[in-house]
Each structure stands twice: as structure tokens, then as C-alpha cells.
Image (tube, grey):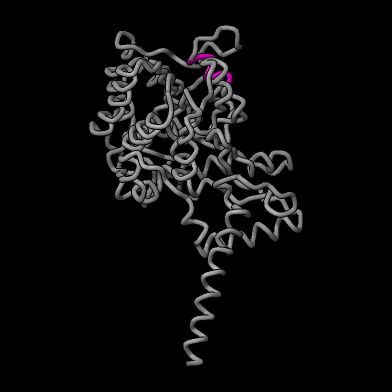
Amino acid sequence: MLSEKRWIKLWILLTLFIPLIALFNYIIDPNGMNNKVHIPGVNVFKKTNTGYSYRFKLNSLIDNEYDTLMLGTSRIGVMNPEVVSHYTKGKTFNLEAPASITEIHYKLFMYALKYNNIKNLVYGIDFMAFNRSRTLKKTYPQFNQLNNRIINKEKVSNYDLYFNLDTTESSFTVLYKNLMNKEIVTDRYLNNGMRVFYPYIDRVKKGTYSFDKRLHYSFHEYYNRVNGIYKDYKFSKEYLYYFSKIIEECKARNIKVWVYIPPMYSSFFDSISAVGYFDEFEKFKRELVKVTNYIDFTGHNTITNNKDNYWDGSHLRVKITSQIMARVFNDNSVDVPSDFGVFVTKENIEKHLKNLRAQVKDLNVTKILSY
């Protein structure tokens, strides 16, 4: 009988304890997934929310707040939505998906249409997004876990996170850091979806940031033999189909669309040729223009030759948003280098590709990856 009473007491304690832990995690919100409660000295400083990219962004889209989307990989993710809003006169959300393929873009885009009256789309489309070697099942487990819910346009709840032991551990870490007034410097998504590299900004302020080290890391991230983003690159017609479907949806729904290819750092552009992918790079652009005109920012130009415009080989600093979007929206009032951005059509594609190929400089990628 005593044993039964102990079990009943234990059950009652657990019944009370688990909801209290969940409430604690919800209030501390260690990864900034709900941002409902802000208590100075308790939960203002948080850990990164970029580990839950899709959960965070899908939940941000369900309140019918946005009429403009920015879509693409993290290369558009670092661009400021407020600059786009200046041109569209609406409210913009940055729906980037890190290192993603166009199948992901399409599904996220359709999900956003379910909950928002989208009138404008700015699409930063990348060479990486068409790599046949990267698939949902093999490469994107976080997205794949939500795939069916995204396809069915279901709201994605984060409440399970608050019953999670890892979240509880993070909550205590965040609480301690806040009590000690120790700022947590980490990458974060803002409420408008933009990614901010706070650690890099912090290092710049301290004079410890090294672009060369970050560039070296970029080469390993894209070309390592295990899971490099460009590993075994082969252009995918299936992923071109998903891109085409997005453009078709825009036409059917009278959504204005602007497409551009984001600029990578100049030596990173050279590396595509050095590893033997330049034919695929040109194919990507030829196939793209069959679907829609676009602005191509790749190659050697005033912006891409200047490392002060970049965090690494792929990601521009936010200050360049103004020049990117001025060219995209044909705003002549902003000072944009004349060699930055070429409007590509079926009529000028071959001349443009010839000019780009002539810009390529020799680069020993093998040597770079050897250390």
C-alpha cells in the first residue's frame, strides 16, 4: 500500500514538474523561438535560432503580415528586407534557406502563399541550388522532418521544444549568462528573417576578424570530399522544374518577381573553373534565362574584388544590400558601380558568358584545401 502511495506522489510530482519545466523553457526561450517574454537580467541574451531555421521561419509566416518575400539561400539571407520594402512599399520577409535546393524554395514559397497575400518576390537564385547530388532525404534532415507538414500547409508548432531536455539545458545556460550579464554573441535571425553574423561584427569591433581565414573555411565548406556543397556537381533538370514552377505561380497570381544571381567573392568565382565546374556554371545560366530574365552579379567587378564587402567567399556584408537592390529595381539614384550586375536575356546570354569566361583567373584550389 505504501509503495502505491509513493508511486501516486511521484506521479503527481511529475505531473506538476513537467509543465513547470515547459513553462520555464517557454519563458527563458533560449533560442528565441517565440520572443514573447523579455526580462532584463533573465532572458534578453539568447543562443542562436539558426539551428531551427525552418521552424522559426514557418512560424513567422502564419500571421498574414507580409506582402513581399525574399527567397533563396543564405546569400540572400544576409540582405536587409527593409531595403526591399523601400522599393515595394510593403512589408518584406527574408525566406532564405541555408545552402538549399530549389525544391525547398518552391515548398517554402507555396507555404508562404497560404498564409500571406504575397504581391512581390525577390529571388536570389544560386548555382548551388541546382546540384543533383544534394537531395532532401540525404542532405536536409531538418527540412525533411517537416516536409509533409510544409506540403500540406500545416502550422508547425514549437511547443515540443519546451518539453525537450536539450532545451532545458540551454535555458539554464541562458539564465546563468543573463544573471552574470554575459552577452551571448551568436548568429541570429531577426524577426523579419534576415540572418545577422553577430560574431563577425563583434570581431571586427575588436580588431580580431580575419577575412582570409573565413575565405579559407569557405573553400573547405564547398569543396570538401565528404559533404561539400559543390561536391560531385551536376546540374539538375528536376531542380530547374521547381524554379520554373515558382515563376509560373508568380505569373498566375500576378506576383511581381525580380530574379538575380548573388555575387560571390572573386576568387570563389575563379574556383568554379579551377575544379572543372564552369561548363555546369554556364549551363545553369543558360537554362535559367529560358525561364526568365535575371541580373547576374557574378564575376570580377568592383564589388566582388573588394574583400571588405564580404564576410567570406559567399556572404556579402549587409551594407551592399542597397547596391544589390538598386540594380535589381533599376534605381539610378543610388551609386552602383557600372560593372556590378548585368541584365541577362536570351539575346545577350552568350555574349555575357563569353565575357565572364574571359574574367576567370588561375587558382590552385587543391593547394588551398591542403592546409
Q: Could you tell whether 93 is left or right of 198 in the image?
A: left
Residue lying furthest left = 237
Task: State the residue at coordinates (51%, 70%).
Answer: 15
Q: Closer to the camera, 70 or 27? A: 27
Whether residue 325 appears in magenta in the rendering, the answer is: yes
Task: State the residue at coordinates (49%, 83%).
Answer: 7
Q: Is residue 78 visible?
A: yes
Quadrant of residue 323 within the rendered picture: top right
Quadrant of residue 316 within the rendered picture: top right
Q: Closer to the camera, 305 or 17? A: 17
Residue 89 image position (x, y, % from top left): 54, 16
Whether residue 163 appears in magenta in the rendering, the answer is: no
Residue lying furthest bottom = 1
Residues in magenta, as a range: 322-328
Majority secondary structure of magenta residues? helix
Residue 153 image position (x, y, % from top left): 35, 38
Q: Could you tell whether 191 is left or right of 366 in the image?
A: right
Q: Is residue 354 visible?
A: no
Task: State the residue at coordinates (52%, 43%).
Answer: 216
Residue 104 image position (x, y, % from top left): 35, 38
Residue 337 image position (x, y, % from top left): 56, 13
Residue 134 higher or lower than 170, as above or below: above
Task: State the residue at coordinates (50%, 10%).
Answer: 330
